[in-house]
Amino acid sequence: MASLLDVGRHGPPFWPFIAARVAETIAETSNRGAVVVAMHSNAGLFAPHIATTSPKPVDALIFVDASIPPDEGEADVVPPEFLAELRAKAQDGLVPRWTDWWTEEDVAPLFPDPATRRRVIDEQPRLPLTYYEQRIPIEPGWTSTPCGYLLFGPPYDEFAEQARVRGWPVVEASGQHLHMVVDPEGVGRALLELAESLHA
């Protein structure tokens, strides 16, 4: 898995570093078989650059409870109305950790136990506000790569519906946005199911 914990030190813009880091990981591991890239949450917006930067052809892209970029043009990392909220939260140019954006009522159900919650929270970087202000250029043609969608639940059901309209296979693993830390085996099976259907 490509580690992007230090992404905040490599921009703006940040998307070239993200694509390059994933490309490095693919180069190190792609001798193991098909190249299938799974992206969670807003990492989905970087799919076009990941596909075109990869040192080997990407066999499939899987969006895991993730945003889907447009076919071409530009993509906002966050919607403009939410960007205003992040600007209000920022201090010294840094936005609080993602889990600090929400109430305890929102955050607690994301984790199976306190120990897992602490490990995830401790690993989170505080990203620069400029990370969320960047606009990602999207070159046409990226959807020629086979794509699939793994849905955990709202509000990403809107993106799952976009995937269905595009004709992509959609698999549902009902849960919260961080369901992979709650049921890693179930999510792993769902990812394999999607990967096999896309690379049949």
Image (cartoon, grey):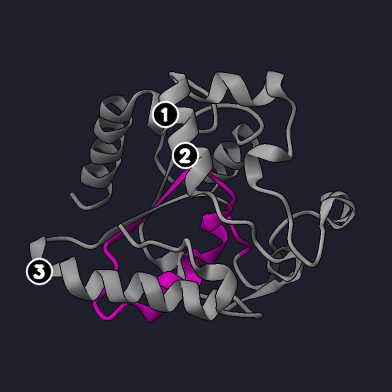
Q: Residue at x 59, y 21 (%)?
A: 108
Residue beneath disc 2: 120
Specify whether 198 is left or right of 136: left
Q: Residues within 10 Å of mark 2 (few under 14, many from 20)?
A: few
Q: Residue at x 64, y 38 (%)?
A: 99
Q: Position of residue 134 (x, y in %)?
A: 72, 72
| Residue 177, disc | none
Under mark 3, the amino acid is Asn
| Discs 1, 2 touching: Cβ within 8 Å | yes
Question: For the residues marked 3 and 1, what is the alpha-carbon distance in whole angstroms?
Answer: 32 Å
Under mark 1, the amino acid is Thr
**Magenta region:** 42-70
Identify whether 200 is placed above or below 47: above
Question: For the residues marked 2 and 3, what is the alpha-carbon distance in whole angstroms?
Answer: 30 Å
Q: Residue at x 59, y 44 (%)?
A: 162
In the depicted view, which residue is nearer to us: 144 or 69?
69
Specify whether 36 is left or right of 131: left
Between circles 3 and 1, the one closer to the viewer is 1
Point out the tag, 2 or 3, that comes first from the N-terminus.
3
Answer whether residue 151 is visible to the viewer in this image.
Answer: no
Q: Secondary structure at mark 3?
A: helix
Location of residue 25 by image quarter: bottom left
Residue 32 on the magenta segment: no
Under mark 2, the amino acid is Val
Q: Secondary structure at mark 2?
A: helix
Residue beneath disc 1: 116
Question: For the residues marked 1 and 2, what is the alpha-carbon distance in whole angstroms?
Answer: 6 Å
Residue beneath disc 3: 31
| Discs 2, 3 touching: Cβ within 8 Å | no
Identify whether 55 is placed above or below 41: below
